Amino acid sequence: MNPFENRTVVLGVGGGIAAYRVCELARLLMKRGASVRVAMTQNAQRFVTPVTFQALTGNPVLTDLFDLHQKAIFGHLEMGKRADLLIVAPATANLIARIRTGMGDDAVTTSILSSSCPVLIAPAMNVQMWRNAQVQENVAALRADLRCAFVGPGVGTLAEGIVGEGRLSEPHEILDAAEALLTPQDLGAKKFVITAGPTREFSDPVRFLSNPSTGRMGFALARAAAVRGAQVTLISGPVELDSPPRVLRIDVTSAEQMRDATLRAIDGADVFISSAAVCDQRPARRVASKVKKEALETTMALARTPDVLREARARFGDAAFPDRPLFVGFAAETDHVLDNARHKLADKRLDLVAANDVAEPGSGFASASNRLTLLFADGRVTPFDSLTKIEAAHRLLDAIVPVLSP
C-alpha cells in the first residue's frame, strides 16, 4: 500500500523563513510517488523562487491568479479541484487567519476554497505569535473543521535565535501526517500489541546470546497499523530504529522482560502480533562482573527462556476470537518452512502465522524486503512475492482487517 501513488498533493507555501524547508518536503513526496503541484503566496516568493519548486516537481507553480499565462495553464480554480491532499507549509499566523475566515485572495487560499480534499496545516512562526490568543483561537476553529488537520509546530531554535514552540515540523514528520490522511482508517480504534527485534540474554555485563534480528519487520507492522488508525503498543528488544509515529514504544532487553511487558499490555487488545525473534536460550548463570578471558570456560550451561507467544495465548485459555485478541505469529525457518509453520500454528493455537524462509536471499534478518506466506487456522494459505517490509506489513494487515470486521 502506497497512499501517495497516483495522488495529487498540492503544497500551499506561505511566506515564512521556513519556506525553504518545504523544498525537501516536495522531494520526499515525489519520491513516494505523488504528483506534486505548488501554489505560493506573494510573500513566500520572497524566500524561495517559483523556479525552485518547478525544478523539483516538474510542474509549473501557481503564484498569480490574475496572470493570463498562468490562467491558461491552470484554468479557473483547477489546482484545488484536482488535489487529493493540500498541505499548507509554512502556515504563518497571517495565512492561518485568512484560511480560518474563508478568504480567497491569493493562490494558496483560493486553492483551499476550491478543493474538497483534506487540508494539512503545518504552522511556523515566532513563539510569541504562536502563543497569541487570537492565533490560538484561529487554530482551534480550524481544528474543529473536519477537513483540517495539524502537524506541529515543533519546539526548537527559531529564526531569531529564541527557543520555543513555533518551529516548522520536520519534512519527514509532515510526510508521516500526510500519509495518515491519505490512508484508509480501516483499523480505527483497534488496539494492537506488537513485539519486535531480538532479545539479549547476558552471561556477564559485556557478553550475551542473541540473534541477527534488526526489528525492521515489527517496526514496519507498528507503523502500518498506526497509519491505518490503530492504537499500537510496540514492545521492542534492542534495535537501532526510530519509533514509528503515534506508537507507544516499550523497550526491553531479555525474553523475560518481553514476556512481562507483553502480559501487562495485552489485556484489552484486539490483535497481538509476535514478530520478535525471542532468544530461546539464556546462560544458566549470570555473573555481576566481567569474566576475564583467561577464566572463561569452554562450555556454557544454558536454560530455556520464556515462550512469550505461548504464554500470551495461554492467558486466554480456550476463549475464541473475538472474546480474546487475534493471535498472529511469525515462523522464521530455514527448511520445511510451511510444515514448521503449520506446526507452530496448531501447537500454539494461533489464528494466523506468517512464514518466511530466512535463508532465502532478500528475505532474512536485516533485509529490507521479505517474502511471506500466510497460513490461517481455517486452512487458507496465501503466499506473497518479495516485498519491502512496509509493503509486507500492509499485506498482512489487509488479511487481518476482514477478520476484525466481518
Image (cartoon, grey):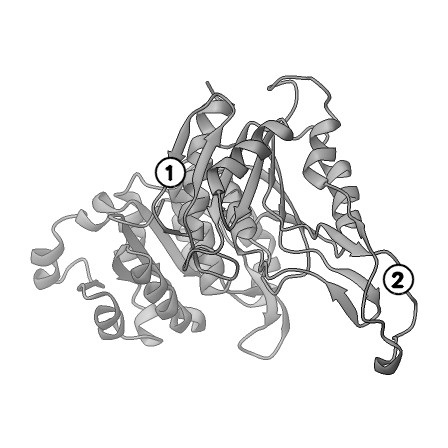
Q: Residue furthest right?
A: 288
Q: Residues within 10 Å of mark 1 (few under 14, many from 20)?
A: few
Residue 1 bears which disc, if any?
Answer: none
Task: Using the rendered image of the protein, determine whether residue 321 is visible from the camera's viewpoint.
Answer: yes
112 over 192 or under it: above or below: below
Q: Nearer the viewer, residue 305 or 314?
A: 305
Looking at the picture, which amino acid does disc 1 mark? Answer: Pro
The quadrant of the picture occupied by the N terminus is top left
Residue under numbered circle 1: 383
Q: Position of residue 75 (x, y in %)?
A: 11, 51
Q: Is residue 330 left or right of residue 74?
A: right
> For mark 2, does the 10 Å Cα neighbourhood hold few (<14), some (14 to 19), or many (20 or more) residues?
some
Q: Residue at x 55, y 52 (%)?
A: 219
Farthest residue to the bottom: give it.
Answer: 294
In percent of width and height, residue 157 lies at 60, 74
Determine which of the numbered discs, if any, sits on residue 286 in the image. Answer: 2
Residue beneath the point at 7% across and 57% down: 72
Mark 2 lies on a secondary structure that is: loop
14 or 248: nearer the eye?
A: 248
**In terms of sequence position, does the residue under pointer 1 or pointer 2 come before the other?**
2
Kindly state the secondary structure of the residue where label 1 is placed. Answer: strand
